[in-house]
Image (cartoon, helix red, strand yellow):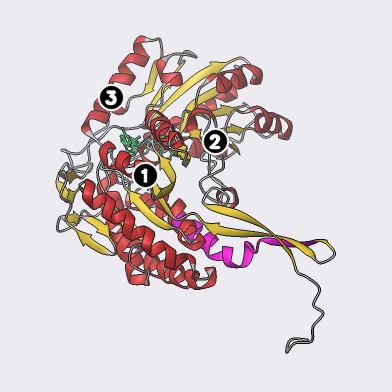
Amino acid sequence: MKAQLPAEKIIAHSMIHGEWVPGRGDHFSVRSPYNHQIIGEVTCPDAEQIDLAVKAAAAAQKEWAAVSMKERAKILFQFRHILMRDLDKISHIKASESGKTFEEGKAGLMKGIEVLEYALSLQNLDTGGRMEVSRGVSCEYRREPLGVILNITPFNFPAMVPMWTIPINLALGNAYVWKPSEKTPLTSVAMANALSEAGLPKGLMTVLHGGASTVEKLIDHPLIKAIGFVGSTSIAKKVYDRGTQLGKRVLALGGAKNHIILLPDASTDISGSSIADSFTGCAGQRCMAASVLLAVGNDPKINQHIEKIKERASSMVLGENMGAIITKEQVKFLSSMIEKAEKDGATIILDGRKAKAPAGLEEGNWIGPTILDHVKPGSHAAVTELFGPILSIVRVKDLTEAIEIENSVEYGNACSIFTSSGAFADRVIREASTGMVGVNVGVPVPREPFSFGGINASKYGHGDITGAHSLDFWSNVKKVTVKWEKQTDSSWMS
Ligand code: NAD
């Protein structure tokens, strides 16, 4: 199904204490990457509104903390029901503002719903622990909410990335403040409305728009207890430094440059489509996209794999099974990077600059799948996060060289190997310098409850943002030791 742009402009104000309030700060318009038309208007809060919103969230959180997790889950069950009911509607909004295809919009929301299902299971799974440590003395773990937490999200997953943290935080008893990307702020309206309809008490979901100045005021607010950030590495580092200097816990996920190591013995049935889909999915605008293909050895089979990847990538139809690029500036940047790669010695074997814009959407931001072969290790195309549908092929002599190149890049989100050898796969699992590793999988995103998260310049802070390893980040674990005197009197209980 093609993405349907909203019939009327979506207005995104601030959600403060459960009400949509026009922001008294900056105003801006949102254009669809599909055709550059204005599809929404956004108003940003001023300093006073930000302060008011966080104080309202803190007051609401006190009451929410007193509610049992089972009661909180009842509202989250209802939230799931509404998201499933409105799946198509929300997916079209997401696609319209981010440039994703409708199917990608839907897949992202379904991934978010997977995290919601995990959060719903916490009431039965996360039972804490208690032990009698000495006769009459017990020790116990109790998980307690943090208070008001802040999440700052990127443009490329307007629902999935916020859904990494919304359900878990609400289940744990926190109040959630969301600063969506200024490039894709419209999905937040549908998501916050779904929570209100589900019966979430006012103040537990706050939405505040804007860029750096909104983020900075929020980080500095004394009632914000923890900060989650997902976006580029340079901003992740800034947010991490600012938050931690104030003594707050911060988990800031950054950019990526993901490698796929291709061995000649891999199955061509799997490699062609998996690798092509990995670098073209979401038009390459995802932190798990394959970016560098390390083609190992000079066995003729390697070229057969590359031919299959090229065949699949060439079959992508813009506007149908591959979406648009977020901004015109980014299209220009990608074109200049292709030009630079050629100057640096790469051969362009598939040139996305020649791809045709879909009929009727000529004003949109388009570039087709691009494959650069014989990219030099260390060159721009081999080490920089491009964030577009570009695959850089680096030819290497053996697996050792492939691993050395993978390890030399500053990022550490994901790495995959395509092979039919368990021993080679195991070596890459052990030696890859990434938080997530795949074997014969193009996009190695773990399913919940396995947590999502990279290492090195792809993540600042400790723990993971989703799954079992996120719980300690989003809560306090209280350790309780109890000893009662032996009861000697005879009371109504004895
Ligand atoms: P971005 O860093 O430009 O923006 C992310 C968020 O930071 C937005 O909400 C933005 O408003 C805010 N922001 C911008 N400037 C700021 C500043 N100076 N101070 C504080 N906040 C600021 O990222 P983007 O372009 O929206 O998203 C793409 C990037 O996100 C890519 O690098 C991609 O790899 C990364 N990403 C990473 C993951 C992951 O899990 N590691 C997931 C998705 C996207």
Position of the N terminus, as image quadrant, is: bottom left
Q: Nearer the viewer, mark 2 or mark 3?
A: 3
Residue appearing at x 45%, y 58% in the figure: 174
Looking at the image, tell me whether mark 1 or mark 2 is earlier in sequence order: 1
Q: Where residue 119 sits in the image (x, y, percent)?
A: 52, 61
Q: Is residue 378 above or below residue 38?
A: above
- Residue that label 2 marks: 271
Identify which residue is drawn at 51% across, 60% down. 172
The residue carrying mark 3 is: 333
Determine whether the beta carbon of the residue marked 1 sits less than 8 angstroms from the nearest atom of ligand 1: yes
For residue 261: magenta? no
Range shown magenta:
112-132
Q: Is residue 1 visible in this depiction of the protein? A: no
Q: Main secondary structure of the magenta part?
A: helix
Q: CA distance from mark 1 to mark 3?
A: 22 Å
Q: How many numbered marks does the figure carry?
A: 3
